[in-house]
Image: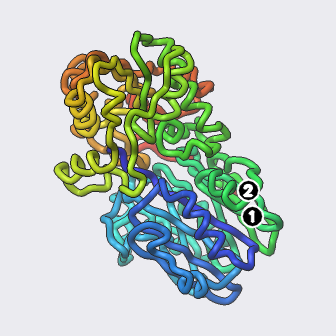
Amino acid sequence: MKKESCGLFGIYGHKDAARMTYFGLYALQHRGQESAGIVTFDGQKTFEHKGMGLVPDVFQENDLKKLLGHIAIGHVRYSTTGASQLRNAQPFLVHFKDLQIAIGHNGNLINTWELRQELENEGIIFQTTMDSEVIVHLLAKYLNGNSLENALAKALNKIKGAYSLLLLVNNKLIALRDPFGFRPLSIGKMGSSYVFASETCAFDLLEAEYIRCIRPGEMIVIENDRMSSFQFAEPEKPAPCVFELIYFARPDSIIFDKPVYLARKKMGEILAQESPIEADFVMPFPDSGVYAAIGYAQESKLPFEMAMIRNHYVGRTFIQPSQDMRDFGVRVKLNPVASMIKNKKIIIVEDSIVRGTTIRTRVKKLRELGAREIHMRVSCPPIRYPCFFGIDFSSKGELIASSQRIDEIARFIGLDSLHYLTIEGLKKSIEWQDNFCMACFNEEYPLKPGQKCGKFCIEW
């Protein structure tokens, strides 16, 4: 299935910064289940701890006690570039002259190879295979004769792609988003402390106040308890990733200043308007389709049923390394309520179809239990084109809708009918203002390889 982006959390000015970051990452665990890490600063030196696995497995009480300091940044990762190895876990920490630099990155750069070759030709040695390390080496390159902020802006002017970043550099905490604003990053306050997070659900857990989303091309610097905001690059036409609203974000979050729950429910409502059908009930495949299914059921005045039960102690199916294991994970993770299925006409609402193999297994099970008709409604348009900005469906060959018609997909999955939300319906559901990236649906990439990303526009 779909691979995640990553999750970022940062805090400035809290006596227990590591513990607060731990809880923040816990709230963002859905964004990355591969590795987790925290770096702190106590005014003199940095401390770090990271490891492979889930947040509560990586951090024990003794680990948090060793992470001293009042500033911290944390990261949960699902790799989009770079292998799944401990050396690629973030935050990535380096020491350069008198600076201790830690960086956490959510997104994906599209000119990493060119920049890496350029830097290696200059004698730079890389420690990891992830694109985020390129940013650190570029920063170090421009630090000679420049302030930290100015060097960072110059470095960012060289890279292309999606990046929301948190940097801890000695006593400074820096947060920024790329000029297109592909990936989310918000700022909040918890008492006198500043907090940053990929999603506002992390603020809710800590009872922090949500202030706003960081603007595209904006750099926020916090030092000596003071916050400064600068436009490090001219903002491009905004292109936040619409898949954050469709799938990635937790439904209790606010993403790009939009409530996720209401957006998904609206997708289901419009889906029901576009493709109504008589049935006994509407059901989701938990958990991703739940909120669109609620909207579909309410709009169509049909019962909403949870006719598949999720085992919450099983990891997401796409983490499995082979298709055989993925299919097994489907059976372990979701189990249908047999008494609800036999002789019923069922509408299944799903958020998306990538390969179709996981859904096919689930539908086959419903058929075996005696479902009379199975109709599927999908709360996004067909995914036909790869994403280069932090979602790991990077080749058309992985995408069933890139090579098959909708009726062919329906036959492959085993459905009586299949309807995807139209692009017009999706725009309506998110109150479209011509400012979302929908390239995976329409191939209209905001940024293509070889295109310059932003213009350097500030001097410190």
Residue 418, x across and y down, in percent: 32, 19
Q: Would you place residue 260 above or below residue 57 in this image?
A: above
Q: Would you place residue 18 above or below residue 412 in this image?
A: below
Q: Give the amino acid at mark 1.
A: Tyr
- The label shown at residue 188 is 2
> Which quadrant holds residue 84?
bottom left
Q: Would you place residue 415 above or below residue 368 in this image?
A: above
C-alpha distance separating marks 1 and 2? 6 Å
Give the number of marks: 2
Could you tell which of marks 1 and 2 lies nearer the N-terminus?
Answer: 2
- The label shown at residue 248 is none
User: Pointer 1 and pointer 2: residues touching (CB < 8 Å)?
Assistant: yes
Question: In this view, which residue lies farthest toward the left?
Answer: 324
Residue 307, x across and y down, in percent: 39, 33
Q: Is residue 292 left or right of residue 420?
A: right
Q: Is residue 11 left or right of residue 366?
A: right
**Pick the front one: 385 or 194:** 194
Q: Mark 2: which secondary structure?
A: strand
Q: Give the amino acid at mark 2.
A: Gly
Residue at coordinates 72% horizontally, 70% vertically from top-left? 12
Q: Disc 1 marks which residue?
A: 194
Q: Is residue 13 left or right of residue 259?
A: right
Q: How would you rate the neighbour count of disc 1 (Cα within 10 Å): few for under 14, some for 14-19, many for 20 or more?
A: many
Residue 273, x across and y down, in percent: 50, 12
Residue 286 visible here: yes
